[in-house]
Image: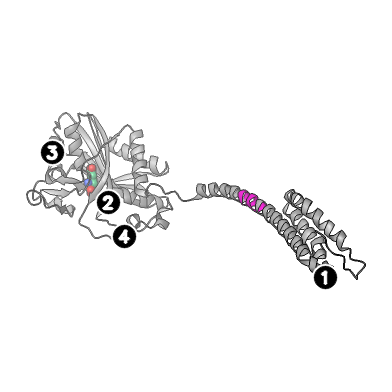
Amino acid sequence: MMAAMNSPDASVDVHELLDRVRRLAADGPATIAAAATVDELRRLDGEFLGKTSVMSQAKAAMRFVAPEDRKSVGGLLNEVRTALEAAIGQRQSAFDSDARRERLAAEALDLSEVMDAAPTGHRHLISQTREMLEDAFVGLGFTVAEGPEIETDWYNFEALNMPEGHPARSMWDTLYLEAGEPESVLLRTHTSPVQIRTMLREEPPIYVVAPGRAYRSDTADATHLPVFSQIEGLVIDRGITFADLAGTIETFVKLLYGSERTTRLRPSFFPFTEPSAEFDMSTPSGEWVELGGCGMVHPNVLRAGGLDPEEWSGFAFGFGLERMAMQRHGLDDIRELITNDVRFLAQF
Ligand code: DAH
């Protein structure tokens, strides 16, 4: 291509400029592709296409090009500019994707940290309490038993020394099911029927705990729930005394709450034990809190379980898991345990 020399301005050598443009067209793209950093690329961009660049000078020199040659010279300049811009764009996007890859790699690291810190959920406080109790009793040589939540009148009351019409039945506000004879099938009001089921299933010696749900026709308030959890304990062996009961209670309370805690038994009444007691635990502030009921298994209960009261004796105890969890964590409203507010649950 021949650019006509039509220059009144001696300082502009159009030929020489166009030579430089052609050299730039030949070498520029490779130089750009070799730019090692974004800064270097930016510098080359300025050098090749900026205000004082050969390209800009050549463009400014167009007015010195003969009109008939302007089209081809302009075409050349456009072509070279486009090629240089393309090379710069390509290099830039290579830098961009490198940066994106680096950022993703960095973010991937962050993500794993976030994963570790993310709340992953855990066992409900009551389940934790139940497992903790199971572990403690297993450590003392007990096994864990279970029984159905739907029970018959016989297991829930009668076999526990509360025949039909016994006034003690009113100690539990019972939810009866519409099945069979009226008031013959119910939601167990306590875990005590598992005592009977265990005695009928296993030969003594028996050292068993039975955690599970119990139901009562109660309205929920700060200290009551219509569905709650208990753990029942039953020991049947030869020569079991009240001292064994007291020692067992003292031992598991210390195990669960710490050795500075102590326990006391207060005389009480339950139809299925004789004598019966309620057991309390000392608190750090020197007060006593009630944990549950206990006593020596009543001879009638041993008989209902198929055992000879002359040969076997035993003790039993039962207490609420919710109350125990509340005591351990200083909670003052039992309903928190079933509301499933994550802000509450996440604390345990
Ligand atoms: N079943 C009783 C209740 O729900 C608690 C209880 C008291 C269980 C004395 C026992 C016991 O095994 O011996 O109120």
Residue that label 2 marks: 228
Could you tell me what secondary structure mostly forms the magenta stretch? helix
Which label's residue is closer to the chain start, 3 or 4?
4
Q: Is residue 112 magenta?
A: no
User: In terms of sequence position, does the residue under pointer 1 or pointer 4 come before the other?
Assistant: 1
Look at the image and give the residue range highlighted in magenta. Answer: 95-102
Whether label 1 touches label 4, CB < 8 Å: no
Residue 70's x, y, as percent?
78, 67
Circle 3 sits on which residue?
300
Residue nearest the observer in this picture, 173 or 115: 115
Label 3 close to label 4 by CB (< 8 Å): no
Look at the image and tell me whether residue 139 can be seen: yes
Dot 1 lies on which element? helix
Quadrant (top left/top right/bottom left/bottom right) for the N terminus: bottom right
Dot 2: element = strand
Query: Is residue 267 among the parts visible in the rendering?
Result: no
Q: Are marks 1 and 3 in contact (CB under 8 Å)?
A: no
Please, which residue is most extreme toward the right here? 10
Which residue sits at x=55%, y=48%? 113
Give the number of the mark in front: 3 or 2. Answer: 2
The amino acid type, in three-letter code, at marker 1 is Arg
Task: Please name whichever residue, 118 or 5, is drawn nearer the observer in this view of the structure.
Answer: 5
Q: Which residue is mark 4?
A: 222
213 on left or right of 69: left
Where is mark 1, residue-wise?
63
Sequence-wise first label, 2 or 4: 4
The residue mark sitting in front, 1 or 3, is 1
The label nearer to you, 2 versus 4, is: 2
State the CA–CA distance, disc 3 to disc 4: 36 Å
Looking at the image, residue 132 sits to the left or right of residue 27; the answer is left
Question: Few, some or many C-alpha atoms within 10 Å of disc 1 (few <14, some 14-19, many ≥20)?
Answer: few
